Amino acid sequence: MQSAFINLPTIRLHYLDSGSTATTRPTLLLLLLHGLTANARMFEPLADLLAPHYRLIAVDLRGRGLSDKPSAGYSMAEHAADIIGLMDALGLERCIVGGHSFGGLLTMFLAAHFPKHVEKAIILDAAGKLHSEVRSLLKPSLDRLGKVFASLEEYILAMRAMPYLCGAWDNDYEAYYRSEAIMHDDGTATARPQAANIAEALDKALEEDWHSAIKNVKAPAILLHAQGSFGAPGAPPVLLEADARETVSALAQCQYEEVAGNHITIMFEPAVRDVASAVRHFIDNE
């Protein structure tokens, strides 16, 4: 995927673009929105599987990746305004929107408040209600923000040891975590997202009236649910099945499908193959 930037009136956003597909049919465009502390490069394993069939654009949300990092302004409405601004600037009147975790919530927000822009919605392990202990479950991931590591290699080793990866690691994990690190002149490394910005984004997301928003989503949707433990064996998933199914039932047109892996590992091999297969079936047969 090719790296690009776009200057909007209030922010500069970075995104990845797979370009045109090799097929002869009209190109379907899939706009991808990442999770709370992630960046667009988390979608590269999925893009490898889907790019032959669709054009994909994955956006670094404000405060993440290579996009601008304002000190405030991390509500769902402000994130959504960025995405609509990017679509308008790129001449994208309507597209399929897919989001993982926080990006899944943003996908539902966009579908509820900007229905003319969302043809279909793909929700990856997100729902209007998350686990009651979601802050505790996310703590190992959030704790890396602002921490100074002696070197990039120390940073990578720390990420590799994260309990929610459950020992999974390959070149895609390595490339993703290297992409989210900043190297400093003294050789130290830190994560790109700022802890205060992410805390604001999480707080604002949890404050949203998701019950009302979900009722306003009319676009066809699919919710892919990862039931794997998020952490050590026996830990709960980030999203409980009952909560996922409650959101599916509340949406006007939504399918439910379980996929292998947990909240993070669904985005990497081998579980990402289940995700890609489900996405293709939903897009092409809905």
Image (tube, rainbow, N blue to C red):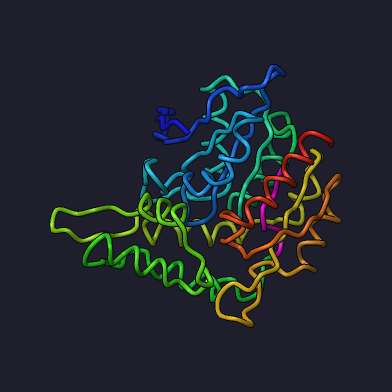
Q: Position of residue 147 (x, y in %)?
A: 30, 67
Position of residue 77 relative to residue 192, above or below, is: above
The residue positioned 43% from the left and 35% from the top of the image is 13
Position of residue 203 relative to residue 251, above or below, is: below
Q: Position of residue 191 (x, y in %)?
A: 34, 58
Q: Position of residue 203 (x, y in %)?
A: 53, 62
Position of residue 110 relative to residue 201, above or below, is: above
Does residue 148 appear left or right of residue 26 in this picture? left
Outermost residue, left side:
186
Magenta stretch encompasses residue 215: no
Magenta stretch encompasses residue 123: yes
Does residue 178 appear left or right of residue 233 in this picture? left
Does residue 236 appear left or right of residue 195 in this picture? right
Instruction: Quadrant for residue 122, please give it.
Output: top right
The residue positioned 64% from the left and 29% from the top of the image is 29
Q: Quadrant of the C terminus?
A: top right
Most foreground residue, 160 or 129:
160
Position of residue 286 relative to residue 265, above or below, is: above
Range of residues picked out in magenta = 122-129
Does residue 33 appear left or right of residue 37 in this picture? right
Instruction: Quadrant for residue 248, please give it.
Output: bottom right
The residue positioned 67% from the left and 57% from the top of the image is 126
The residue positioned 53% from the left and 25% from the top of the image is 19
Most foreground residue, 173 or 112:
173
Q: Position of residue 103 (x, y in %)?
A: 59, 49
Question: What kind of secondary structure does the magenta stretch mostly adopt?
Answer: loop
Most foreground residue, 25 or 73:
25
Total count of labels: 0
